[in-house]
Amino acid sequence: MQGFQVSGTGTGTGAAMKNWRNVALHSALAAGFMFLLQRYGLSATMESSLLWAIVFGGCAAGLAYSQANR
């Protein structure tokens, strides 16, 4: 078992893929939550609900990306 050495820094390709997966998941969950809240909780129109979902999803993606690169 001398040939295998695992780096613990988390800067490899696997860590980058995990970060992007977390950003995408955070964005999708925030957008879904906002859509459901607007559409069914507040009885907003479909267009308004989709617009708010896109805006909150984008903001959540930006926040998750900045936190992943700390």
Image (cartoon, rainbow, N blue to C red):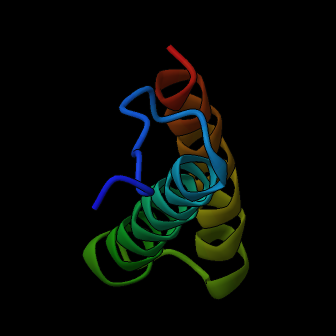
For the point 37% across and 79% down, which residue is it? 36
For the point 33% across and 69% down, which residue is it? 37
Q: Nearer the viewer, residue 67 or 48?
A: 67
For the point 66% across and 74% down, which residue is it? 50
Q: Is residue 63 above or below residue 54?
A: above
x and y, in percent, of residue 39 in the image? 43, 80
Horizontal side of 33 relative to 61 (left or right) equals: left
Q: Is residue 30 above or below residue 6?
A: below
Horizontal side of 54 relative to 6 (left or right) equals: right
Please identify the quadrant where the N terminus is shown.
bottom left
Q: Quadrant of residue 52?
A: bottom right
Horizontal side of 40 relative to 28 (left or right) equals: left
- Residue reaching furthest to the front: 2
**What is the tally of numbered marks visible in this picture?**
0
Q: Nearer the viewer, residue 3 or 37?
A: 3
x and y, in percent, of residue 14 in the image? 55, 58
x and y, in percent, of residue 51 in the image? 72, 64
Q: Nearer the viewer, residue 64 or 53?
A: 64
For the point 58% across and 72% down, which residue is it? 49
x and y, in percent, of residue 64 in the image? 50, 37
Q: Nearer the viewer, residue 67 or 2?
A: 2
- Residue reaching furthest to the top: 70
